[in-house]
Image (spheres, grey):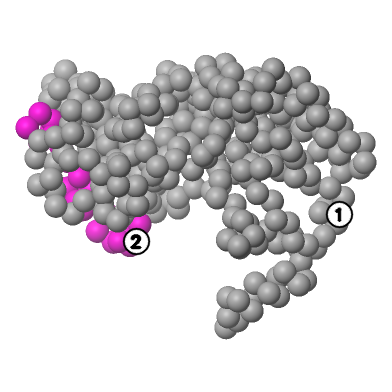
């Protein structure tokens, strides 16, 4: 096969290379690629920046806390929130449109790396295209049916266990945690079990069933939880997915954890973050509590100032990767007629 370096060199030679840094610019798609469409978006950005009350971009982003912009709002209003800390656009222009191949390279020396959520980087002038793009990702960039079916079997079993655990729990509600340990680089999140329990117990139902998604192999680590809750792990339900590839176990953990009444995750973990995105999709689609502003009964163990992040609408802001943002799921079916 072709060596990675040779392939990269070839792509940079034959393709239109775009080194777009999502921390510095917003990839913007005008409703038309003619000069007027590009000029219109650029003029809107200039107007937004000129009208800012101050240069503190953190405070600018905070203006949208608890105040989401309507998904069908004006271009200016939607762009003002989407820019977050950025001051410029990376425009999808006529040259890009006509190119047979566009290559977004990864090169640390040139600070070229698209480490961001798709919805935090892409802006469509036409709000219908924006919502279509988000629905496309929700409906097609998902785990395969084999995983979905295995997760459904386990969730059914966990609900049945929860009913038996508490006779008044007729719905079979259970709570979930994601505790990331292993080789996680953010050591400040590696808390002891007693500390994790202390930080989470105010959100959990005493004596309730608690499913724990974790890479911790020594389940005895969670003994403090076992004294208060009916805890269970993926391993307890292996008979329900005997033929499943073990490489899928992490994804299976995510799907199950996403169905918790209350969910508590690990900050900085994209694994925890995606569980919240799946929760957001479900809540929004079924119009459950929090669907209007994209919030949910999800929390984080630590840091202290991040524990309640999912309980209030937060706009996209740097750094993007430690969590998911409601703009990914809030009201994305607005222009789809109810069946």
Query: Which numbered circle lies on residue 95?
Result: 1
For the residue carrying disc 2, how many other residues have a C-alpha within 10 Å: few (<14), some (14-19), or many (20+)?
Answer: few
Within the magenta stretch, is there residue 240? Answer: yes
Residue at the location (70% across, 56% down)? 19
What's the magenta region? 225-248
Is residue 252 in view? Answer: no
Residue farthest toward the front in the current orientation of the protein: 55
Query: Can you name the residue that lies furthest to the right here?
Result: 35
Residue at far left of view: 227
Above or below, 115 against 170 in this view is: below
Q: Would you call the spot at circle 1 few (<14 residues within 10 Å), some (14-19), or many (20 or more)?
A: few
Residue 303 in the figure: left or right of residue 58: left
Q: Nearer the viewer, residue 286 or 251?
A: 251
Q: Is residue 88 left or right of residue 186?
A: right
- Of circles 2 and 1, the one toward us is 1
Q: Position of residue 196 (x, y in %)?
A: 21, 34
Image quadrant for the C terminus?
Answer: top right
Q: Is residue 103 above or below residue 171?
A: below
Name the mark on residue 247: 2
The answer to whether residue 20 is seen in the rendering is yes
Spatial CA distance of label 2 from label 1 is 41 Å
Location of residue 106 in the rendering, given as x and y in whole percent from the top left corner: 61, 61
Secondary structure, mark 1, is helix
On the rendered structure, is 140 left or right of 218?
A: right
């Amino acid at each position: 096969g072709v060596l990675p370096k040779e392939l990269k060199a070839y792509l940079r030679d034959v393709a239109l290379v775009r080194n777009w840094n999502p921390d510095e610019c917003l990839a913007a798609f005008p409703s038309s690629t003619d000069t007027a469409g590009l000029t219109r978006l650029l003029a809107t950005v200039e107007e937004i920046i000129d009208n800012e009350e101050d240069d503190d971009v953190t405070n600018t982003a905070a203006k949208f806390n608890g105040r989401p912009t309507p998904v069908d709002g004006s271009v200016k209003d939607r762009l003002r929130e989407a820019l977050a800390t950025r001051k410029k656009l990376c425009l999808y222009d006529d040259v890009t449109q006509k190119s047979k191949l566009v290559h977004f390279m990864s090169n640390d020396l040139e600070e070229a790396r698209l480490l961001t959520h798709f919805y935090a980087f892409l802006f469509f002038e036409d709000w219908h295209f924006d919502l279509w793009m988000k629905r496309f990702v929700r409906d097609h960039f998902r785990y395969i049916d084999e995983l979905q079916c295995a997760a459904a079997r386990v969730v059914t079993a966990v609900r049945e266990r929860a009913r038996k655990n508490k006779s008044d729990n007729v719905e079979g509600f259970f709570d979930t945690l994601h505790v990331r340990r292993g080789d996680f680089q953010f050591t400040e999140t590696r808390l002891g079990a007693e500390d994790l329990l202390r930080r989470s117990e105010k959100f959990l139902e005493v004596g309730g069933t608690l499913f724990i998604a974790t890479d911790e192999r020594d389940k005895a680590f969670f003994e403090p939880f076992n004294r208060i809750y009916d805890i269970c792990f993926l391993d307890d339900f292996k008979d329900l997915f005997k033929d499943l590839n073990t490489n899928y176990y992490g994804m299976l953990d995510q799907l199950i954890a996403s169905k918790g009444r209350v969910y508590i995750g690990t900050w900085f973990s994209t694994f925890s973050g995606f569980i919240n995105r799946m929760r957001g999709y479900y809540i929004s689609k079924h119009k459950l509590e929090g669907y209007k502003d994209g919030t949910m009964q999800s929390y984080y163990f630590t840091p202290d100032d991040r524990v309640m992040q999912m309980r209030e609408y937060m706009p996209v802001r740097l750094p993007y990767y430690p969590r998911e943002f409601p703009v990914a799921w809030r009201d994305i079916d607005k222009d789809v007629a109810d069946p």
